[in-house]
Amino acid sequence: MRNYLDILKKIEETGAKAWLVGDTVRMIEMGIQPETITLAIDSDDMYAVSQAIGTGTVDARGPFPALRGELLGESFRAFGLRGGTIEDDLSFRDFSIEAIAIRSDGGVVDPFGGRLDIRNRVLRLTGDNVELIDSDPLRILRMLRFAAEFNMDIFWKTDADVRKFLDVQAERMKSIPTERWGREILKGIRHRPARFIEYCDVYGLLPFFIPDLEKLKKASDGKGNTIYGHIIHILQIIEKRLETNKIIQNDTVVLAGLLGHLNSVKPDLSDRDKQADRMITEYMTRWNITSETISNVLAIINNYRRFYEPVTEEMFCRQSLNYSRTAMLVALQFAKCAAIAEGTVSKYRDVLDNNSWNLKQVLRRFKTVELQTEGASRYMTGREVMHLLNMKPGKRVGELLEGLDMAIGTGKVSSRKAAEEWLKSQTA
């Protein structure tokens, strides 16, 4: 806390008053370490503040220009004060738990009882002002994200105001740009995916951002439950494993759990898998999710069931090269979650454990290459192969490199010298 106050004092040496605000104060009150410090500054000239403190750049994109930089070893972002006072500025913020400010002397400005709401784990609109929802309906999704992530109850009046708004103006939700939906959805499912989706269902939001999931409420999974219920069960299992840090790349795993069964009610056509991939890709593209994450999600969905049968090191090596090493590791983690959800984990436990061992051996061998070559993915480049074997560029060079990758992944090659000997043996 002292370092944060020193940052405020450093800025105030320029003559501009500054406060800690928003997510920074909320996280401090919750005992969470903020990654970035958020400030409000009573200055209309961010460029002047930046020059005075000798650090940072002004990002003028969007409605609220921000000064971003680093002070005393902490990353910060500073916004101009909205309104004439800090109290005015706080009144524009979504919820009481974020409408708190801290002065440079350590004093707290809390006009809407945000600290008490944090202690009572209650989420309410700042000042019970329903116009905050009317001005930006996406705040509803943000409210559900906070409620799920921090296990908070929604204040009765906020709940009533939101439901009334959705009853009367639900169509306005459709006007929200899909990339804004995507940012909140990804944040919402990152830590408490099942709770977040269930909250969205309670408030009737699923048809707005993932209508194909809504349709699965009436589709049977063949075991007495709905496909929607099965998806929620998978997300609940993933959620528990996230809490104990048993899953890496949580965005990828959660998206696979959320989207992996969307095509379950489609007819059994020859191109069903391609249809599913297109549908899943379209959702994630609309949500502005990176192409790498999309690729890894598809790799999980299309491969995890293969891990219910024994997989050789050769096959793991090939899959790791076709997709990515991380994608295969995450797909195996997802397979364990799916087996638990399907009630088959005892049946497949030994196979999954053996597959996990085989995959880790393959990945360890690839990692050894990186350690020995200072980060390179191969012992030799195509140019080096051509020089070693006195070859010209062509398809054969690519085939040799792919074969060398397989030899490394399966443990037949473990050094530069061994790689050269292997290549020579292929042309002898």
Image (cartoon, grey):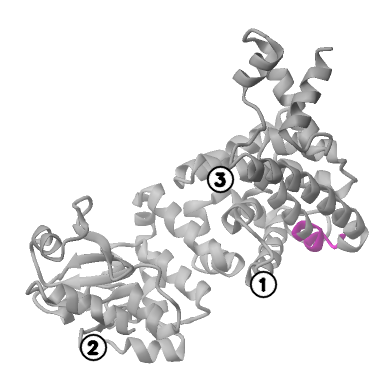
Residue 111 circle label: 2
Q: Residues within 10 Å of mark 2 (few under 14, many from 20)?
A: some
Which image quadrant for residue 427? top right
Residue 137 circle label: none
Which image quadrant for residue 108? bottom left
Residue 338 lies in the magenta-colored region: yes
Distance Cα–Cα, label 3 vs label 2? 42 Å
Q: Which residues are magenta?
A: 337-344
User: Residue 187: image x %, image y %?
Assistant: 48, 61
In what element is the residue under mark 3?
helix
Which image quadrant for residue 44? bottom left
Looking at the image, can residue 201 be seen? no
Q: Residues within 10 Å of mark 3 (few under 14, many from 20)?
A: some
Task: Give the residue displayed 24% in from the left and 75% down from the top.
Answer: 7
Q: Is residue 374 above or below residue 394?
A: below
In depth, the one of 191 and 204 nearer the eye is 191
Task: Give the residue displayed 82% in from the left and 43% down from the top.
Answer: 306
Q: Is residue 197 above or below residue 8?
A: above
Residue tagged 1: 244
Amino acid type, residue under disc 2 in the picture:
Pro
Of labels 1 and 3, earlier in sequence is: 1
Residue tagged 3: 293
User: Residue 414: image x %, image y %?
Assistant: 77, 38
Amino acid type, residue under disc 3 in the picture:
Thr
